C-alpha cells in the first residue's frame, strides 16, 4: 500500500473528528447558555467580592456572627449552582438529548468547582472561620440540597430548600449542636460532617444527572 492510497482515507477521518469536536463544543455552549450559566458566573464573582468585603472590613464580628455572614454568602453561591439546572426546553430536550445526562453532570461539577473557587479567591489573605475546607464542605453540601430540591420544585425554585437549611444551620450554630447533619456548624476536621455533606452532594448530583430538574409543576419526571 502506498502513501497516496492512505491519504484520502485519513483526511476525511480527521475532518470528521474536527466536525464532531466543534459540534460537541457548540452543544455544550448552548446547554450552558440555556441555563444562564454565564450570568451565574458573574454573580459568583460578585459573591466572592462580597465575602472579601465582609472579612476585610470585619462586618460581622463576634461569636456566631463571624460564621453566619460567610454562611449566607456560601449558601447564595450554592443556590446559583442549583438554579442553573432549569431547562427552558422541557420534555423536548429530554426526548432528543442523548448527551443530556453528561451535560448535566459536567455543568453541575463545573459550577460547584467554580463556586468554591470564586469564594476561595474572595478569602485570600483574610481570616475565614473554619478556613477554606469548611467553605468547600458548606458549598458542596448545600448544592446537594439544592439539586435534590430541583427535582421537586424545578430549578427556579431550588433556592427554597437551601435557604431553609441555612436557617436551620444558623440556629444549630447558635445552639452549638454537634450533629453531623448540621455541617456548617461543625469544625473543619469533623469527619461525620464531611460524610453527610459529601453524601447529600453525591445523591443530588446523581439524581439531577439521570432525572433532571422538574420543568413544570405538572411534570412528574
Image (cartoon, rainbow, N blue to C red):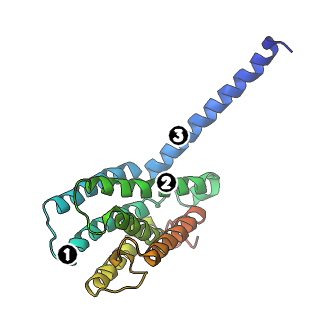
Tell me, for residue 26, which label it has, or none.
Answer: 3
Label 3 environment density (alpha carbons within 10 Å; few <14, some 14–19, many ≥20): few
In this view, the residue in front, 178 or 26, is 178
Q: Quadrant of residue 84?
A: bottom left
Measure the alpha-carbon separation of dots 3 and 2.
Answer: 14 Å
As drawn, 13 above or below 145: above
Residue at left offset 41%, top offset 60%: 81
Q: Quadrant of residue 180?
A: bottom left
Residue matched to label 2:
107
Q: Secondary structure at mark 2?
A: helix
For the N terminus, give its image quadrant.
top right
Q: Secondary structure at mark 1?
A: helix
For the C terminus, give its image quadrant.
bottom right
Q: Is residue 68 left or right of residue 115?
A: left
- In terms of sequence position, does the residue under pointer 3 or pointer 2 come before the other? 3
As drawn, 35 above or below 4: below
In this rendering, the count of numbered labels is 3
Q: Closer to us: mark 3 or mark 2?
A: 2
Q: Closer to us: mark 3 or mark 1?
A: 1
Residue matched to label 1:
65
Q: Quadrant of residue 163?
A: bottom left
Residue at left offset 16%, top offset 58%: 56
Residue at left offset 79%, top offset 11%: 4
Measure the alpha-carbon separation of dots 3 and 1.
Answer: 45 Å
Amino acid at each position: 500500500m502506498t502513501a497516496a492510497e492512505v491519504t484520502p482515507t485519513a483526511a476525511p477521518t480527521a475532518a470528521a473528528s474536527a466536525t464532531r469536536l466543534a459540534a460537541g463544543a457548540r452543544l455544550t455552549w448552548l446547554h450552558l447558555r440555556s441555563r444562564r450559566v454565564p450570568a451565574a458566573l458573574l454573580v459568583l464573582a460578585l459573591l466572592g467580592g462580597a465575602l472579601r468585603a465582609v472579612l476585610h472590613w470585619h462586618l460581622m464580628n463576634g461569636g456566631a456572627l463571624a460564621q453566619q455572614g460567610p454562611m449566607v454568602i456560601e449558601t447564595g453561591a450554592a443556590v446559583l449552582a442549583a438554579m442553573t439546572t432549569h431547562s427552558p426546553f422541557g420534555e423536548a430536550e429530554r426526548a432528543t438529548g442523548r448527551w443530556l445526562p453528561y451535560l448535566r453532570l459536567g455543568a453541575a461539577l463545573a459550577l460547584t468547582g467554580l463556586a468554591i473557587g470564586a469564594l476561595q479567591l474572595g478569602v485570600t489573605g483574610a481570616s475565614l472561620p473554619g478556613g477554606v475546607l469548611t467553605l468547600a464542605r458548606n458549598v458542596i453540601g448545600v448544592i446537594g440540597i439544592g439539586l435534590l430540591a430541583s427535582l421537586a420544585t424545578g430549578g427556579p425554585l431550588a433556592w427554597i430548600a437551601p435557604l431553609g437549611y441555612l436557617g436551620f444551620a444558623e440556629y444549630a450554630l447558635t445552639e452549638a449542636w454537634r450533629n453531623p447533619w448540621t455541617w456548617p456548624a461543625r469544625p473543619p476536621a469533623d469527619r461525620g460532617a464531611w460524610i453527610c455533606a459529601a453524601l447529600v452532594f453525591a445523591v443530588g448530583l446523581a439524581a439531577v444527572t439521570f432525572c433532571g430538574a422538574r420543568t413544570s409543576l405538572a411534570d412528574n419526571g
